[in-house]
Image (tube, coloured by chain):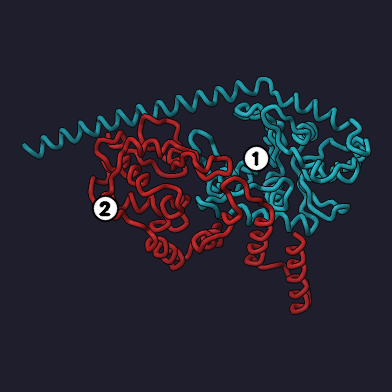
C-alpha cells in the first residue's frame, strides 16, 4: 500500500510538473493501481495461491474492456489465441458417458480455497444453465441447454463445437462469462467428453 | 402422404416437447414460489437481535489491556456516537490518514485505545461452529443503530474518491482458474445462480437493495455475517485466494458499493437464507 501511495503521489506530482496543475490519473493508471492494491490485499490459502491473481492475456484484455465495447479486432485476437490452445481429443471420440456428465454438471466443488485439493472437481454447470428438465434448480447467467442436440442436430460439427466450447469458451465468444474448463485445467478431457455426451447423446435426458 | 405423415409426427413431437417444457416451467415457478414463502417466513423474528444485544454489551464494556470501552471510539460522528454512523461509512479518518469501513475502524479503536495488538484485534473476524466473533457482534450492534437512516457515504476527500475509483476497477478484475470477476455474477439484471437471485451491483438500484441488507443473519450458517465476510466469501467462490480482513481492496470495494447505495434507507441487520 505504501508503495502504491508513493506511485500515486509521484504520478500526480509529475503530471503537475508537466501540466502546471494537478491532473487526475488516467484510466489505465487507475486500473494498474487497482490491480496492485488488489494483489497486496490477498494471501494464499489452501490450494488458491497468489498466482491466481496473475492475469493471462485473455483475462487482462477482458478486464480492460469490461465496461466498454470490445473492439472487433481485439475480440478476434482473443478468440484466435484461445482457439489455438484447444486440445482436441486424440482418439477422435467426442462423446463420453452422459450419466457421468450429469454428475459433473451438478458438482459445485473444486478449486476453491475451502475445497479438498484431492476432492471432486465439477463444472457446476447448473449454477448458470438449464440442462435436463428434471433439475429445476438452475441459474440463468448462461443460456438454456435443454434439448441442445435435438434443436441443433446430432452432427459431428455440433459435437466438436460443444467440446471446444466447454474446453475454451473464449475461443468462440471473447470475454464470455463462461470459464475455460479444459484450458484452465478445471476439468479433465474425459469430464469434458462426458459433458458433451450430456448435451449430444440422443439417450441423454437433455434431448428427450 | 409421406410428407403429411412427417408433418403430423413432427407436430406430435413438438406437442410432446411443449408438455415437457410446460411441466419444467411449472416445477420451476412453484419452486421459486416456495422459496419466496420461505424467505417471507424468515422475516418474522431475526436471530440477528442476539448479536446486536451482545454487541451493545461489548461496545459499553471496558476492554483490552487498557480496559477502556468504545465510548471514545469515533466512527465519524464524534466519540462514542453510534446512531447513524454506519450509513456514512466508509469514510476518510484524518487520525489514521486512511479511508476505513466499520470493521477497520473498530479494529483501529481496539488497537489505539484499548491496547490490543493488531493481530489480537483481527484474530477472529468471522464466527464459526462453536466460536464467536466479537467483531460480528459489534458490527451487528453498530449497524442496527443505522436502521432506517438514509445512506450518505461521502466522496469529499481525495482518498475517498480514490477508494471509490479503485473499487470500481477491482469489481471488474478477472482472475483465478475460472476467469471470474465480481461483474460475472453481479453485472446484469435479473440473473440467478441456481435459484439464488443475483443483484446487479453496477446499477444504483441493485447496489441499494444489496448493500442496505448487509450485515445479515444467514440461516444456512447460523451466523451473523458482515460485509467483510460477504466480500471474502464471494472471492472464495470466485476461486481467488483469501481476501485479507480490513485490507485496502476490501475497503475500496466496500466504498464503491456503499457509495452506490446512497439515497436508500439502510435496513439491516437483515435475515437471509
Residue located at (34% from left, 29% from top):
B22
Residue A194 in the image, given as x and y percentages of width and height: 33, 42
Q: Could you say which quadrant of the image residue B17 lies in?
A: top left
Please state which of the two labelled residues, at mark 1 or mark 2, is closer to the viewer. Answer: 2
User: What colour denotes chain B?
Assistant: cyan
Q: Could you say which quadrant of the image residue B139 lies in?
A: top right
Residue B156 in the image, given as x and y percentages of width and height: 79, 55
Residue located at (61% from left, 49% from top):
B241
Residue B40 in the image, given as x and y percentages of width and height: 60, 23
Q: Residues within 10 Å of mark 2 (few under 14, many from 20)?
A: few
Pick out the residue farthest to the front. A118
Name the residue carrying label 1: B230
Q: Is residue B148 visible?
A: no
Residue A110's place in the image compared with B168, above or below, is above
Name the residue carrying label 2: A91
SS for dot 1: helix
Residue located at (74% from left, 79% from top):
A18
User: What colour denotes chain A?
Assistant: red
Q: Nearer the viewer, residue B109 or A92?
A: A92
Amino acid at each position: 500500500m505504501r508503495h502504491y501511495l508513493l506511485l500515486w503521489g509521484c504520478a500526480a506530482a509529475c503530471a503537475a510538473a508537466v501540466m502546471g496543475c494537478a491532473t487526475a490519473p488516467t484510466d489505465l493508471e487507475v486500473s494498474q493501481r487497482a490491480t496492485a492494491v488488489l494483489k497486496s490485499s490477498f494471501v494464499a490459502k489452501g490450494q488458491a495461491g497468489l498466482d491466481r491473481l496473475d492475469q493471462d492475456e485473455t483475462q487482462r484484455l477482458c478486464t480492460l474492456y469490461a465496461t466498454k465495447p470490445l473492439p472487433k479486432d481485439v475480440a478476434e485476437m482473443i478468440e484466435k489465441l484461445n482457439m489455438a490452445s484447444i486440445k482436441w481429443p486424440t482418439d477422435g471420440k467426442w462423446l463420453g458417458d452422459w450419466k457421468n456428465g450429469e454428475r459433473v454438471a451438478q458438482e459445485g466443488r473444486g478449486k476453491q480455497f475451502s475445497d479438498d485439493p484431492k476432492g471432486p472437481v465439477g463444472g457446476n454447470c447448473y449454477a448458470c444453465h438449464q440442462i435436463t428438465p428434471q433439475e429445476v434448480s438452475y441459474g440463468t447467467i448462461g443460456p438454456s441447454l435443454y434439448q441442445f442436440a435435438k434443436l441443433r442436430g446430432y452432427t459431428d460439427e455440433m459435437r466438436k463445437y460443444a467440446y471446444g466450447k466447454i474446453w475454451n469458451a473464449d475461443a468462440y465468444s471473447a470475454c464470455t462469462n463462461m470459464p475455460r474448463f479444459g484450458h484452465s485445467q478445471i476439468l479433465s478431457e474425459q469430464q469434458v467428453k462426458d459433458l458433451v455426451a450430456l448435451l449430444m447423446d440422443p439417450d441423454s435426458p437433455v434431448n428427450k | 402422404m409421406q410428407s403429411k405423415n412427417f408433418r403430423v409426427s413432427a407436430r406430435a413431437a413438438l406437442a410432446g416437447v411443449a408438455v415437457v417444457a410446460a411441466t419444467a416451467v411449472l416445477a420451476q415457478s412453484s419452486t421459486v414460489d416456495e422459496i419466496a414463502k420461505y424467505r417471507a417466513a424468515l422475516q418474522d423474528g431475526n436471530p440477528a437481535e442476539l448479536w446486536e444485544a451482545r454487541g451493545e454489551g461489548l461496545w459499553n464494556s471496558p476492554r483490552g489491556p487498557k480496559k477502556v470501552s468504545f465510548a471514545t471510539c469515533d466512527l465519524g460522528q464524534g466519540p462514542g456516537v453510534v446512531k447513524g454512523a454506519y450509513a456514512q461509512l466508509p469514510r476518510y479518518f484524518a487520525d489514521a490518514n486512511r479511508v476505513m469501513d466499520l470493521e477497520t475502524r473498530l479494529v483501529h479503536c481496539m488497537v489505539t485505545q484499548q491496547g490490543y495488538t493488531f493481530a489480537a484485534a483481527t484474530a477472529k473476524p468471522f464466527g464459526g461452529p462453536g466460536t464467536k466473533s466479537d467483531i460480528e457482534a459489534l458490527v451487528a450492534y453498530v449497524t442496527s443503530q443505522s436502521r432506517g437512516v438514509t445512506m450518505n457515504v461521502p466522496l469529499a476527500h481525495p482518498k475517498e474518491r480514490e477508494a471509490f475509483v479503485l473499487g470500481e476497477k477491482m469489481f471488474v478484475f478477472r482472475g483465478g482458474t475460472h476467469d471470474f470477476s465480481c461483474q460475472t455474477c453481479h453485472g446484469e439484471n435479473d440473473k440467478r445462480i441456481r435459484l439464488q437471485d443475483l443483484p446487479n451491483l453496477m446499477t444504483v438500484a441493485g447496489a441499494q437493495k444489496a448493500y442496505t441488507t448487509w450485515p445479515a443473519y444467514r440461516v444456512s450458517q447460523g451466523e451473523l455475517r458482515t460485509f467483510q465476510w460477504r466480500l471474502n466469501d464471494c472471492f472464495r467462490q470466485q476461486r481467488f485466494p483469501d481476501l485479507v480482513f480490513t485490507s485496502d481492496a476490501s475497503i475500496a470495494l466496500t466504498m464503491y458499493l456503499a457509495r452506490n447505495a446512497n439515497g436508500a434507507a439502510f435496513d439491516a441487520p437483515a435475515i437471509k437464507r
